[in-house]
Image: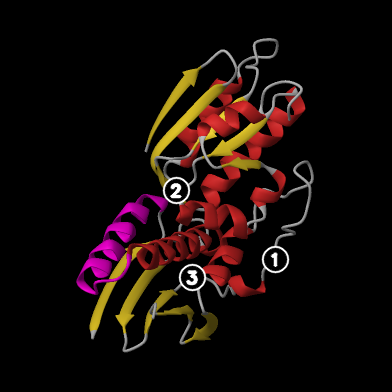
């Protein structure tokens, strides 16, 4: 079993730190590049959601990321101590809209749901907790 | 991420290389705006050659969407080409490949954006 943990402030400048963290885990866990790419995408989208929705004037939430390689799946848990915010409550984007009508936002969480097998949200002990997992390729 | 711009007679090609994430998106958006040119100086067509693109997130998609829309307003044919499978997957999931032309390679894209052949 391979596990990793890191914590960063919810500051966009930390994105490259998280990407490196994920890549190191991907190497240690011998994941396929496509699998690592899916988690990189999920982590970027989740982290930036926390940056956008979780920050208040003078307050920068702390974001903690846990990665775990299990027997048949990779699980990532992202926790933050910002205000209660369930990204899964966001309305899905209209992916059938025309070019002129297409909204520019709202895609991040939609992509996370689509590249992952399970995504669940919980508010526990004053923290937002988003847990995502994807089965290992056969 | 590096971005090169190649101005050909039939189209201007924007060629991103590396990761199109939140950090890279503003620079990429600027490059697309530059490639689209000032009013009256627009290229015959605008093509994003994504063969060197390894990763795209929603921030990158946003830059592409804004450019596609600006091109449409300016009457400039707009297309993507050469997307690697992982990047193509994100364009497909988001529904962008239904509203923006995606071609397998640059030669096909150039042939398709010729006036009168779209």
The image position of residue A6, as x and y in percent, is: 28, 70
Front-most of residues B48 and A41: B48
Q: Residue at x 22, y 67 (%)?
A: A27
User: In the image, which disc is placed on residue A82?
Assistant: 3
Q: Is residue B82 visible?
A: yes
Q: Which mark is residue B21?
A: 2
Label 3 residue SS: loop
Q: Residues within 10 Å of mark 3 (few under 14, many from 20)?
A: many
Quickly name the residue at label 1: A92
| Callout 3 and callout 2 share a chain | no
Residue B29 visible in the displayed image: no
Side of A94 where B10 appears, left or right = left
Please determine whether, in this image, residue A44 is positioned above or below residue B68.
below
Disc 2 element: loop
Q: Is residue A45 above or below residue A74?
A: above
Q: Residues within 10 Å of mark 2 (few under 14, many from 20)?
A: many
Q: Which residues are magenta?
A: A12-32
Residue B112 drawn at (x, y percent): 66, 30
């Amino acid at each position: 079993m391979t596990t990793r943990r890191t914590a960063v402030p919810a500051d966009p400048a930390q994105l490259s730190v998280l990407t490196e963290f994920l890549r190191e885990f991907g190497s240690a866990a011998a994941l396929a590049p496509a699998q690592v790419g899916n988690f990189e995408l999920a982590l970027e989208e989740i982290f930036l959601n926390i940056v956008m929705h979780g920050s208040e004037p003078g307050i920068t939430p702390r974001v903690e990321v846990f990665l775990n390689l299990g027997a048949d799946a990779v699980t990532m848990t992202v926790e933050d101590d910002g205000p209660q915010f369930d990204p899964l409550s966001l309305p899905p984007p209209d992916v059938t809209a025309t070019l002129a009508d297409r909204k520019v936002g709202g895609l991040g969480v939609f992509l996370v749901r689509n590249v992952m097998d399970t995504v669940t949200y919980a508010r526990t002990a004053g923290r937002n907790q988003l847990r995502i997992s994807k089965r290992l390729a056969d | 991420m590096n971005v090169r711009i190649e101005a050909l007679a039939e189209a201007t090609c924007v060629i991103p290389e590396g990761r199109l994430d939140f950090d890279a998106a503003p620079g990429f958006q600027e490059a697309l705006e530059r490639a689209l040119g000032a009013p009256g100086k627009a290229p015959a067509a605008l093509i994003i050659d994504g063969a060197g693109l390894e990763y795209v997130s929603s921030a990158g998609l946003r830059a592409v969407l804004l450019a596609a829309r600006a091109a449409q307003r300016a009457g400039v044919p707009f297309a993507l080409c050469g997307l690697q499978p992982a990047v193509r997957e994100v364009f497909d999931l988001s529904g962008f490949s239904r509203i923006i032309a995606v071609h397998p390679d640059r030669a096909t894209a150039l042939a398709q954006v010729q006036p009168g052949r779209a």
